[in-house]
Image: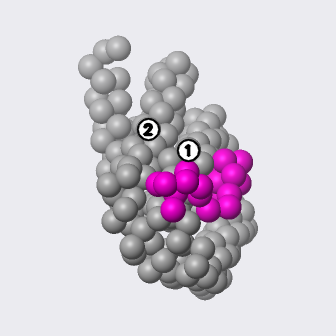
Amino acid sequence: MNLSLWGIFVTVAIAHFLALLSPGPDFVLIVKSAIRNGNKKSIGIAVGISVANALYISLCLIGVGSILAKSATVLVTLKVMGGLFLIYLGIQALRAKKDSYKKIALAETNNRQLETTWISEFITGFMSGLLNPKNLLFYLSLFTVVLTKEVSLSFKITLGIWMTTVVLFWDIAIIYLLSTSRVQRKFSKIAYYLDKLTGAILGMIGFTIVKSAISK
């Protein structure tokens, strides 16, 4: 790999990681799942988000992303669907009863967790990543700036695999940090209130996205 390609790789890698550090709907969902479900089931949400990111990365790399971005109808529809999905998740969190959160504290002794499955967490993560318009727009703008026609397909594929892997391992790292026994004990005391807070945040983000899409 020559110096110019290394420069492109480093630029994309830094920009991508900085975007991961910025808390958004996906991050909120990961935190919410980790404190409620433990690491085994919550990994499903990380994998789902990564697969959705991989899909958008692939679309942008082959040029489909630019076609979607030029269609105002597609973008508005995507934003409205994403906003409504986040509002739905927020409502679900706000409706949860306090008694159900007692299972978080019991998980240490009887190894039981809240009612959910790996597949359901995967679907939630995938839908969140897919219906988050920022993902498509971020990858599209990033690749448009740094990836020219002169860049080989193999380099683009390598870059796509790298970013997908970083998303997956970053999300898993957050899950394992929040689901360790020490952190879990602390979170079990505030899980109910934290879940309500994250639910409210998701709802507000969703409402803002829908409002912005409709107004435009």
> Does 33 lie within the magenta span?
no
Q: Residue at x 37, y 62 (%)?
A: 185
For the residue carrying disc 1, how many other residues have a C-alpha within 10 Å: few (<14), some (14-19), or many (20+)?
some
* Residue designated by label 2: 169
Q: Nearer the viewer, residue 51 or 171?
A: 171
Q: Is residue 89 left or right of residue 22?
A: right
Q: Amino acid at mark 2?
A: Phe
SS under mark 2: helix
Q: Nearer the viewer, mark 2 or mark 1?
A: 1
Give the mark nearest the N terminus, 2 or 1: 1
Task: Decide if residue 207 is in sight here.
Answer: no
| Horizontal side of residue 170 vs 18, given as left or right | right
- Which mark, by number, is residue 128? none
Residue segment shown in magenta: 106-130
Residue 61 locus on image (x, y percent):
58, 35
What residue is shown with label 1? 40
On screen, residue 152 above or below 67: above
Residue at figure coordinates x 39%, y 75% from the top left? 190
Q: Amino acid at mark 1?
A: Lys
Inter-mark Cα distance, 2 to 1: 14 Å
Residue 20, image x, y percentages: 39, 51
Query: Residue 83 in the image: x percent, y percent?
Result: 62, 73
> In this image, 78 relative to 148: left or right?
right
Task: Give residue 16's quadrant in the image.
Answer: top left
Q: Quick one: SS at disc 1?
A: helix
On the rendered image, what quadrant is the N terminus found in? top left
